[in-house]
Image: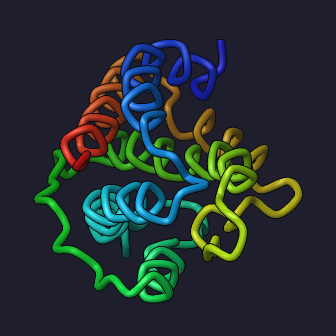
Amino acid sequence: MSAALALRERTAAAHAAVDAAFAGYDLADAGGYRAFLIAHARALPAVEAWLSGRAGMPDWRPRAGALAEDLAALGVEMPAPLPFALPDDDAAAWGALYVVEGSRLGGAMLARDVGAGLPRAYLSAVFAPGEWRSLRAALDAALVDEGALDRAVGAAEATFGLYQQALL
């Protein structure tokens, strides 16, 4: 089984819990969408800051700027990010990256639910053709032993947990 598929399967419960918690936000409503973005803004920048500058990681495009842009368009400043730290370990970085980059896939689907006239730069920051496939291949190449995969799973679950903690 590929590491990307193993990550997906082993973190499915944590992922489903976050999806269920965020499903309560009405993205068509300005207030609900604002609260959704604020919750993401409490989590995503913390993870991206932790990931930034790590050697050995593939190219990835941070989205905190797009999130700040959308919040500014709604008249809201970026909230302070929640504290976030993982072990200083390459496998942990892969687990965190899997969560934040994987959320681009869901963002593309959620962008369709955003109300007319509301900003959507954050949710519209989707993968370019082939990017997700390249990331999965890089995960598979990096997480070649069970110990590394276990550490990546733990980090991914902690990252999903941060998003749950960020809920308003």
Number of numbered discs on residues: 0
Q: Residue at x 72, y 68 (%)?
A: 116
Side (left or right) of 89 relative to 60: left
Residue 51 x/y as whole percent: 35, 63
Side (left or right) of 69 relative to 35: right
For this orientation, the residue located farthest to the right is 129
Residue 17 location, quadrant: top left
Where, quadrant-wise, is the N terminus in this rendering? top right
> In this rendering, is residue 42 above or below 101?
below
Q: Residue at x 72, y 45 (%)?
A: 109
Colouring chosen for the image of the structure: rainbow
Residue 119 x/y as whole percent: 61, 76
Residue 45 location, quadrant: bottom left
> In this rendering, is residue 123 above or below 27?
below
> In this rendering, is residue 18 above or below 129?
above
Which residue is nearer to you in this view: 3 or 44? 44
Q: Residue at x 61, y 68 (%)?
A: 59
Residue 152 location, quadrant: top left
Residue 129 x/y as whole percent: 88, 58
Q: Residue at x 25, y 62 (%)?
A: 42
For this orientation, the residue located farthest to the left is 83
Residue 104 x/y as whole percent: 63, 52
Side (left or right) of 107 relative to 82: right
Which residue is nearer to you in this view: 11 or 65? 65
